[in-house]
Amino acid sequence: MEAALLAALTVVFCLATIYIPLLGMVTGFFWPVPIVLLAVRHDFRLASLATIVAGLLVGMLAGPLTALSMFLGLGVLGLVLGSSIRRRVPPLQAVALGAIALLVSLIVFFVFSLAVIGINPLQDYLAMYQESMEGVLNFYKGLGLDSDTLSRMEETLSQTLSMMRYLVPMALVAGSATLSFLNFTLARAVLGRLGSSYPGFPPFASWHFPRTVAYGYIAGIAALMMGNYYGQELFTHIGLNIQAIFQLALLLQGIAVAWYFMMRFNVPAALRIIGLVLVFFTPFFSQMLFFLGLFDTFFDFRHLRT
């Protein structure tokens, strides 16, 4: 009975993701949580059966390709996270296993879509971004912006589109890790409400990465320089992705360092949240916190290793 209810809830969340834009912005990230709960409270076999049933129902209502793209990705994530939590693996390992499973399933779907169906999801996504870019430019043109400003905006958006073609692997890795962490956090909270305790991550202010993350960032820069020096686009592509992945990790560590000192000096929570928002919308702040995270890997400003 519980498997049927959770499978039905999964179908409702999936359909909301497809057909209800505002609500879908939330359910699109968290609809695997019922699958996680089912795998934890019962077993992997029952959770897999419920996932297949939910996928078939979504396929009947929204189309088989839509169902395949959703369940081959996040459905697999829910099963792996639930199985990991049920086996009481450490939180970091559970999130890592979920991220790897999601990443592999997305690659499998991409290969299947390209080889069997003849559709390139990446090209469709980039074409969608191109259309949205033209819509943004037309919107600002309607506001009466001068031609010089519009030309600069068009150049910036075109550069972003060009960079996105290079950074697809980084986006897949970072997106898989983020989705795995978000679903783990919500599933753990729901399990706590249901009386099943499971350890979580340490406080954000104490998060830190090993020093090898800094070396990985330096390796990305070295590969990028090699690509520019020898004119090899492959090295440039690899260097950009390696650099971007480790740069995100160091930025996260820099935010954790800043959060630690803001808590230590009793900065109000509202100001801390405003500072966090500024990081994502102000390149200067994000660059400063990136360097803070980079230096923290060597100098340990919070004395976490002592």
Image (cartoon, rainbow, N blue to C red):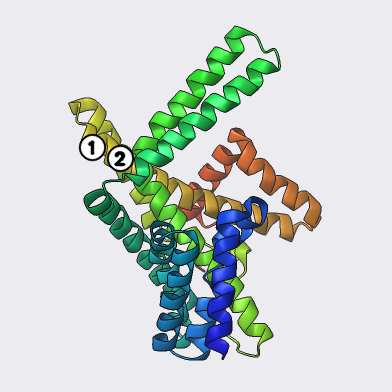
Residue 280, relative to residue 255: is it above or below? above
Pointer 1: what residue?
235
Residue 303 in view: no
Label 1 crowd bin: few (<14), some (14–19), many (20+), radius 10 Å: many
In this view, the residue farthest toward the top is 147
Residue type at the position of mark 2 = Gly
In this view, the residue farthest toward the front is 60
Secondary element type, mark 1: helix
Can you tell which mark lies on residue 101? none
Pointer 2: what residue?
239
At horizontal 50% and vertical 63% (from top left) the residue drawn is: 61
Do residues under tags 2 and 1 come within 8 Å of each other at their CB atoms?
A: yes
Q: Quadrant of residue 44?
A: bottom left
Secondary element type, mark 2: helix
At horizontal 39% and vertical 54% (from top left) the residue drawn is: 173
Q: Nearer the viewer, residue 55 or 166?
A: 55
At horizontal 34% and vertical 48% (from top left) the residue drawn is: 169
Judge from the rendering whether residue 157 lies leftward or rightward of residue 44; answer left or right: right
